Image: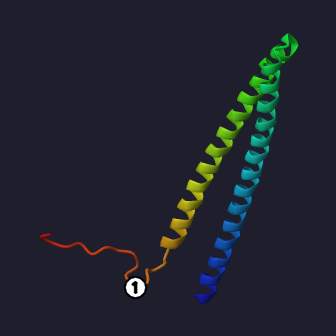
Amino acid sequence: MEDDVFSGLANGQQIESKVVQAFQKSFVQVQNILDQNRALISEINQNHESKIPDNLSRNVGLIRELNNNIRRVVDLYNDLSNSFAKSMEASSEGESAGATKSDGRGGQKRVRSGH
């Protein structure tokens, strides 16, 4: 039985490690897109200030690219949020599957009568 507890803990740590790696990968992707956006915004501002017709026309495409990048960031954050919620559900299910609280009552609440 003790081996089951330790193997369960090791498996939980392995899953947690994969979740953390996935979060890190997503945050790196978000940061890269935000860095691209910073460069795009800078170029858009320079083109706008120059008032040169070709530069202003180029801004149309740059703004589209910026909008697409913003959508990608929103999608990545949405995916992160969903992944985090799922990992929290899996974590809480793992904790409640046979684990007892430190008070030894196994997580069940006592119902008071009359109050």
Give residue 110's position: percent from left, percent from top: 27, 75
Type of the residue with mark 1: Gly
Position of residue 41 relative to residue 22, above or below, is above
Q: Nearer the viewer, residue 71 or 40?
A: 40
Quarter of the image with the N terminus in it: bottom right
Q: Residue at the top extreme?
A: 53
Q: Residue at x 68, y 61 (%)?
A: 19
Quarter of the image with the C terminus in it: bottom left
Q: Residue at x 59, y 60 (%)?
A: 87
Give residue 50's position: percent from left, percent from top: 83, 18
Q: Nearer the viewer, residue 78 or 109?
A: 78
Position of residue 16 relative to residue 84, above or below, is below
Local SS, label 1: loop
Give residue 17's position: percent from left, percent from top: 71, 67
Q: Nearer the viewer, residue 2 or 112?
A: 112
The residue indicated by pointer 1 is 104
Q: Quadrant of residue 42?
A: top right
Q: Nearer the viewer, residue 44 or 8?
A: 44
Side (left or right) of 61 relative to 110: right
Q: Residue at x 85, y 17 (%)?
A: 55
Q: Quadrant of residue 20?
A: bottom right
Q: Residue at the bottom extreme?
A: 2
Position of residue 9 relative to residue 84, above or below, is below
Give residue 81's position: percent from left, percent from top: 59, 49
Disc 1 packing (10 Å; few <14; some 14–19; many ≥20): few
